[in-house]
Image (cartoon, coloured by chain):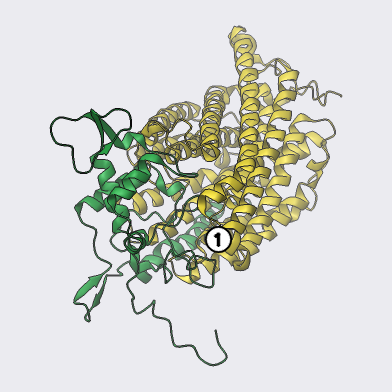
Amino acid sequence: MKSSPLFFLALFASLAFSLTALVLATNAQYGSLAPYADVTVGAAFPQAPLGLAARGQMVYQDLGCAACHTQQVRRADFGHDKERGWGDRQSVARDYVHEDRVLLGELRIGPDLANFGARAAAQGLDAAHLLAFLHNGQGAMPAYPFLFAKRLVTGQRSPEAFAIAGSPDYELVPTPRAEALVAYLLSLSADHEYPETKQPAPEKGTK
Amino acid sequence: MTTVSTNVALPEASDIDPSARCPLLILIGAAIGWLVVGGVLALIASIQLHTPGFLACCPFMTYGRMQAAQETAFLYGWAINAGLAVSLWLLARLGGSPLRAAGLASVGAIFWNLALALGVAGILAGDLTGFAFFQLPAYVQPIMFVAYAAVAVPGVLAWTGRRNAFTFATQWYAVAPLFVFPWVFSVAQVTLLFAPVHGTIQAVVAAWFGQNLGALVLAPFALAAVYYLLPKISGRPIRYYDYAAHGFWALLVIGGWAGGRQLIGGPVPVWVATTGIIASMLLLFHYMVVGVNLVGALCPRGSTVLRFAAIGLKAYVLGGVLNAVTSIRAVAKFSQFTFFSVAQTQLLLDGAFTFMIFGALYFLVPRLAGKPWPSAALIRVHFAAVLSGLVLKVGGLFVAGWIQGGDLNHVAVSFPAMAGHLQPWLLAATAGQALMLLGSLALALNFARLLVVCFKQPARELLCGSAAAEVPAS
């Protein structure tokens, strides 16, 4: 390799090769993917998160929740995501079209959360359960005490506040960040069927 | 043991090395500083994995932020600073001329590290981007792009202004990251932060960036050093050198594609994962060439430099093979989303890259400073601590990943139960991280003592260059 221009041209070409495919071609392929308008229901899916839940995604991002939780359900024959109850179908690209920052996650120290809201609703978990869980922690998940403020009870207790054992004059009130995070977690659902998620009818001799 | 080469004041040492002294000592000093800072952050994060309540009282100490901060301090603080220093030094040496525009590199290095410090503080304050290997807040990234370019300019000038038209493998590997990093960094900044692409294309771009940073920026820095040091120290030519160019271009052309293997089974087009798998397999050719070329480093014969390089090289080839094996879908089904992939990454970062660069630093710092390393004992401590730390940390993570892969695919095992199964192995990883931190402190202390000795000398003596000795390796 004697010629500098040729060397740098070759470097440029080799990088352009993977850039063209992975950045430009993927963008051309599904950069304009839109929500699916389901005429049977008269609504488009996935639905955009409401204000509080959208703020909650920022809390999820800034606390680094994605370091331990994924948000991608794998297909039924690839791992045991379905058996764990994380979702009946595989996550698809359309599930993420409303997200400003897509945090798929790379490590499962905790469960997958792609479909957490739908799961919580089915199990009867509400915001109060989740707030208690955030405050106490469990297993590998630490407690997040800083998402709550200790407050002197004056007059009536706040409806969302927790009592503190041993100090009846005080209560624990979830901060707006905690409420946003919980609203976000409860909004997570990826269970609507799109054309690309519908399983073709099994044919003879195939899986 | 014997001293390998006690008097290697090479003819060019007196006029080339001093030209690079200021920027390179800034880069190396900052690199070692970040290695220690990153080690402390990594230790806290590692403890939090088996003791979740550790320092969990305040938002800036949560595991998510700690992990992002330690990864950033390691990659952008230790790895890039040290890699740039090694690259500039090699390019100046092999170019045969004093480093031109060295002042620009010094300014760039200072800005790089100031911006990085701001960035790491920003991550702890909650401004992390959430993308692995790309956690730096948007507000420091453009400055870092410019600063990196400023440091890279003298390297490119040393390449274009070289005395020999012919170039060596060392030079290709040393110059490539100077060009690759600004490109992939700027593409990632635009497509992920300033004009973000939609939906899961972000995940594809982030995987592409991370792959390029590891395989086309950090790995070439380290390989450049070993391609130079092995023949220099052992006195023997590189085996099958004719194949080195094939190995280099295989890495450059295929390397960027392999990021897709992280997205197997994910909500992205299937071809992204498939090309990632194929690329990981094809890259085995690169690892084979590197292994065959540099196999001589595996018998270090008492050289400290080669002892570090030999471990780095083994980790590099093993890491490459593991990347290929775990990219097979049937294996990925179990290894994906577990500590197994964390261990693979750490094998390449803490093992391959770091050990090869340690070797290079032990060779070049005495030549830059014009003084031998002050303490051979600290070097022995460093070697023993980082090697045992690496084995414990990566070994612990591999076993933890293995158990976790089994548990995740066993529906009856709950997450708290899984945490219990992983705990002893994560404790081993923490012990390993603590040992590695101890090793980094030994290196930092030795380097600080060298600087003290160096700056006590009259400038004239420094510039003339006394006999720089390679460290006794006993």
**The furthest residue to the left:** A155
Residue found 29% across the figure and 53% down from its top: A184
Residue at the far bottom: name it.
A204
Position of B327 relative to B309 (above/below): below
Type of the residue with mark 1: Ala
Chain with green colouring: A
Q: Examine the rendering and report whether any part of residue B464 can be seen.
A: yes
- Tell me the residue at 76%/24% (across/down): B8
Q: How many marks?
A: 1
x, y percent for residue B303: 80, 30
Q: Secondary structure at mark 1?
A: loop
Residue plotted at (51% across, 61% down): B260
Query: At x 72% / y 25%, what residue is drawn?
Result: B11
Image coordinates of residue B439 in percent, x first then y, are 66, 27
Residue A98 locus on image (x, y percent):
28, 61
Above/below status of B134 relative to A18: above
Q: Chain B colour?
A: yellow
Instruction: Judge whether A91 appears above or below A50 on screen.
Output: below
* Quadrant placement of the N terminus of chain B: top right
Q: Residues within 10 Å of mark 1 (few under 14, many from 20)?
A: few
Q: Which residue is label 1 attached to? A: B412
* Camera-side residue of B88 and B25: B25
Q: Position of residue B448 (x, y in %)?
A: 60, 16
* Residue B85 position by quadrant: top right
Q: Quadrant of the C terminus of chain B?
A: top right
Q: Nearer the viewer, residue B343 or B33?
A: B343
Tag 1, which chain? B
**Residue B224 seen in render:** no
